[in-house]
Image: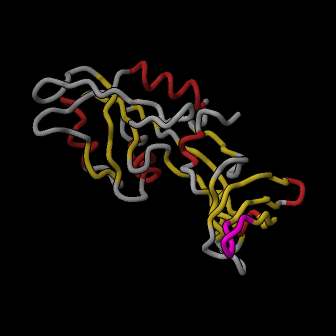
Amino acid sequence: MHKSGTSSLPQVQIVPAQSGGPSVPAWFCVRAQPKREHVAAGHLRLLPELEVFLPRIRFRRPTRRGNVWVTEALFPGYLFARFDWSRCLRAVHHTPGVACVVHFGRRWPTVPSEVVEELRRRLGEEELRVIPDPFRPGDRARVAGGVLQGLEGVVSRVLPARRRVQILLEFLGRQVSVEIPEDQLTPCVDLRLRWDEAG
């Protein structure tokens, strides 16, 4: 997967498999139905002789009701499952929430176990990384509410005690610095790119 500076999503290397798939348990990439990664993971965990890994992030998302905490898959639409291809493929494919096991024609690539273990090490036992700060100085952010709605600028200062953000906006041909409640701002950066920086 792609890189972006120092904070990037991990690059998951997929190893080509021979026609069909391996006859011993191996990690596969499973594509979930839209917005149903957690449903697929829950049902897959009910299958015998099958291991599931769903890396997730938790962060605050601005809404009209203010900032709300949301939990999403680190890789939207995908999760990992370890199983015996020859015995379990059909059961996995027909599991509620699963769209398919990623394949190319008649080839089902596997994901190296060391890649999954490294992701697990970084995310911890709960397979979850909390990203506490959606705004940082230098980030671009868009005003999502109030009289300045729709304008975009650069964050100059975060004021957590007051739950406000100081932002530089282009307004009427000049730059102005304004303080805006954080629940009226939307970050322009993909917070998934910060998953490996959070404590």
Q: Residue at x 25, y 40 (%)?
A: 102
Where 56 sits versus 113, above or below?
below
Viewer-proximal residue among 54 and 150: 150
> What is the x, y in percent for residue 189?
57, 51
Specify the color scheme: secondary structure
Quarter assignment of residue 175: bottom right
**Is 81 rendered above or below residue 156?**
above
Q: Is residue 17 left or right of residue 34?
A: left
Dividing the image into 4 quarters, which one contains the N terminus? top left
Q: Does the magenta stretch include residue 33?
A: no
Name the residue at 10% across, 36% down. Answer: 106
| Residue drawn at (25%, 50%) of the image | 94
Magenta span of residues: 170-175
| Residue 174 falls inside the magenta stretch | yes
**Residue 112 rendering spot, x and y as whole percentages:** 35, 21
Residue 39 vertical position relative to residue 23 in the rendered view, above or below:
below
> Among all residues in the image, which is located at the extreme bottom?
147
Q: In which quarter of the image is the C terminus?
A: top right
Q: Residue 46's quadrant in the figure?
A: top left
**Residue at x 28% of width, y 52% of height:** 99
Residue 117 in percent (x, y) is at 48, 22
Indicate the quadrant where residue 84 lies.
Answer: top left
Side of 88 relative to 53 (left or right): left
In the image, taking residue 117 as reference, residue 187 lies left or right, namely right
